[in-house]
Amino acid sequence: MSSSIESLVNKEYAYGFVTDIESDTIPAGLSEETIRLISAKKEEPAWLLEWRLKAYRRWLTMTEPHWPNVTYAPIDYQAQTYYSAPKSVKPLQSLDEVDPELLRTYEKLGISLTEQKRLSGVAVDAIFDSVSVGTTMKEELKKAGVIFCSFGEAVREHPELVQRYLGSVVPYSDNFFAALNSAVFSDGSFVYVPKGVKCPLELSTYFRINAADTGQFERTLIVADEGASVSYLEGCTAPKRATNQLHAAVVEIVALDDATVKYSTVQNWYAGDKDGVGGIYNFVTKRGKALTRAKISWTQVETGSAITWKYPSVILQGDDAVGEFYSVAVVNNRQQADTGTKMIHIGRNTKSTIISKGISAGQGQNSYRGQVKVLPKAEGARNYTQCDSMLIGNKCGAHTFPYIEVANNSATLEHEASTSKIGEDQIFYCKARGLNAEHAISLIVAGFCKEVFKELPMEFALEAQQLLGISLEGSVG
Amino acid sequence: MPTTSYADQFAAALAAGEGPAWLPALRERAFARFHALGFPTTRDEDWHFTSVTPIAERTFKAIRPAATTLTLADLEAHLLDPDWHRLVFVNGRLEPALSTFAGLPAEVQVSTLSEALREQPEWVQKHLGTLAAFDTAAFTALNTAFMQDGVVVRVPKGEVVEVALHILHVTDAQAQGAAIHPRLLVVAEPLAQLTLVESHVAVGAPSYLVNAVAEISVANGARVDHYKLQRESAEAYHVGTVQVTQGRDSIYHSFSFAEGAALSRTNVYTKLAGTGSEARLNGLYVLDGAQHADHQTFVEHLAEACASRELYKGILDGESHGVFNGKVYVDPVAQRTDGKQTNKALILSEKARVDTKPQLEIFADDVKCTHGATVGRLEQLPLFYLKSRGIGAENARALLTYAFAAEVLETIEVDALRVTLEKAIFERFTHHRMD
């Protein structure tokens, strides 16, 4: 059993290629000048530059937090490059004008823009390094009144919407990495779904870090107006490099009354090699605000990154708001993940569900950290939390740090957690039925994660299941 | 937080102190550590939900208690079972007239700390301060610096103490504004067995600080049952730390009951250091008014095939605030660990608050660890059932509240104690006498 599982867990990172493409990269380092330069390159209005500078000044006063259960060498913020764009990206009339080299990259990643467009009816906004390279299916969305474009374009075309909602859920002063992102973010996606509109397509963004020593600081803002609904997918990859690259993104979701937003992530940044050299530091702030009867649902499959540190959260501000968090986090080799969620119950009869599945293999360290907070006015609030961990091998770790804070007696909270080893008897049973160990493990792991996978849109669910198989290859010893 | 206010007291205590030469050095190290750490603040992760400002902003005075005028009759309600071996401390001072432990087997040594320091200083040195580390624990450092007297228990190899040993700490008006630092050292040698009841009670309603530290060593095959009752005065502050280390196939069973004090913090830490050892940590806290009670448990699985079981329950009324922080750590070598932790809180009033943080840190793969936590009010369905059987709403609530507590009270294996607590809880919530 051990050798086959070992080979299963140790499969190579398939997305580690580098695309040879000319980029417009600014010199490394961070100062007010850098920010002015980024802002100028993006031809931004004065208010946005001002906001960036405020964020930068605040960032200077903040210290990097070290409470997560992860260890890494200090980050030199002056050695990072804060803006890198494929050179040929300038104004695009249609997808045909996109650099064919770039399109081939996406094909390698399996997200051929044209294919996706034709077959799955998914609109894709692809972000290559820091700049959005093309958004598909724009016309279809336009008919429904949905705005789905790069952040830069949104600033130009819909400044009033951006100005109104930018920082309304994650203020620039929120935390160290959010402040850094607010100062230097280069692009991202923007979604606005107008009142009462059900977005006709699944929206999707693909992030890719290509250039070396580049930090990626994208910013996503999703606004679902009253009664609107939208489902948004996000995927990420990066080339293999021996240095660590910083990815500090911010995602803000605003769900106005009766709106529904579903946000799914398959995160497969380069995780470093088996000795922990290289890989992405994925330090992300994701938060949504749900007003009356609104619903925000986060689903994440985290298989990549050297270090993952993120807590997609929901502020349940309106009465009857609903928040959900479904997560699968896999660590193998020397990966570390400290991830979970926060559910802040403010409104009456607010409900939240947390399902977290952690899988640790190799020498990976996996922590679930979550907070469920019920404020005094949150009459009838309800939370159900389940976090299960599975250990594969005896050098990995699984940790659980839930914080449950209840200040209203009509609230009902349930929290369950379990940690166990992958079942020898289950493997034996599968083998007795003619499956080899590799298949047995992927079957057991898929079963373990089923509750989360069923929340993913179909094509993503399949991808996630495959990814999981890949990241666990060779993990059982 | 200011700690300098205790410097003069410390100098005086050190000058007046007796005992072997190593003791002042230990005290000085501890006080220096306390001074360096300061009182914990809510920025400390372990004290995130409990502010000790009411303790830190006052200077509790040192106390040299006079012989008490209290009689056994005054303490009758707190004796629990008159047949138990009993050591009674009033304001930190042993009262031989109220104590009775001559009936203990001759081989079992029970003495005050000062006696033990006189008679077998080397043995005490070998154990005292070795389990209760004070590098990061300010209150333990403070206790070590100031510990006046306490109890030393040594149960020799294979000795089984059939009748419980009751250590009763009584505080009365004499201790108003004072700090008392009781210390307990228990060494159960291989295959020994001991049942220990540790009560903290008050006569009247004085305001004081009890800062207790217990070190318990449970050797191979030994068993210690440790019941701690915290029934301090409503104006008092109580900080108690129990640190246990366990050998192979040993059992440590702890039950912590808390209903007193304005602000209390109870730490129960055990190290499962020998293969096949078992820890059972249970507790019940019952709060009302503006009381604040914080319970912290830490089970370290450091050897193979150990088991830990935890059940903590809280009942909160008024504007009280309950905190539970249970941590289970599984070392890479601790394969075949079986850990289970449950924490439930029942909130009776609108303004009561609960913060709970059950933690698992697991570094071994062949383990089975679970934890569960619930917070809420009484379930509607059982209430409805009782009402449909003709039981009024108020009685139904009282019965269910009692039943909630009874689940954990049932784990008490000492009959006299279980009956006493069941009766106390029943009468508290049903307002009926239980006879």
Image (cartoon, rainbow, N blue to C red):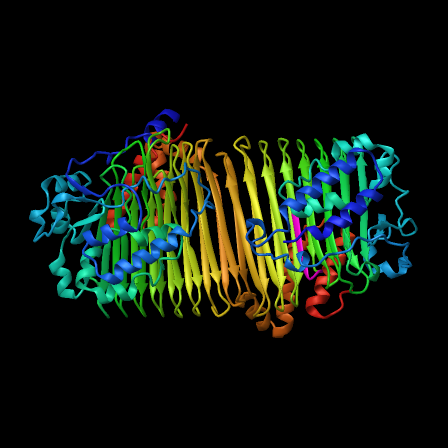
Q: Is residue B424 visible?
A: yes
The span shown in magenta is: B260-267
| Nearest to the observer: residue B9 or residue B209 | B9
| Nearest to the observer: residue B309 or residue B262 | B262
**A161 vs B195: above or below:** below
Residue under the image location 31 percent in, 69 percent down: A258
**A329 vs B334: above or below:** below
**A164 vs B343: above or below:** below
Check the picture and name the quadrant holding the C terminus of chain B: bottom right
Residue under the image location 67 percent in, 45 percent down: B34
Q: Give residue A420's position: percent from left, percent from top.
A: 47, 39
Q: Quadrant of residue A44?
A: bottom left
Magenta-span inclusion, residue A302: no
| Horizontal arrangement in the rendering, residue A262 relative to residue B195 (left or right) | left
Q: Give residue A375's position: percent from left, percent from top.
A: 49, 65
| Horizontal arrangement in the rendering, residue A84 relative to residue B25 (left or right) | left
- The chief SS type of the magenta part is strand
Residue under the image location 45 percent in, 34 percent down: A396
Q: Is residue B228 visible?
A: no
Q: Give residue A25's position: percent from left, percent from top.
A: 20, 42
Q: Give residue A104's position: percent from left, percent from top.
A: 13, 39
| Nearest to the observer: residue A165 or residue A399 | A165
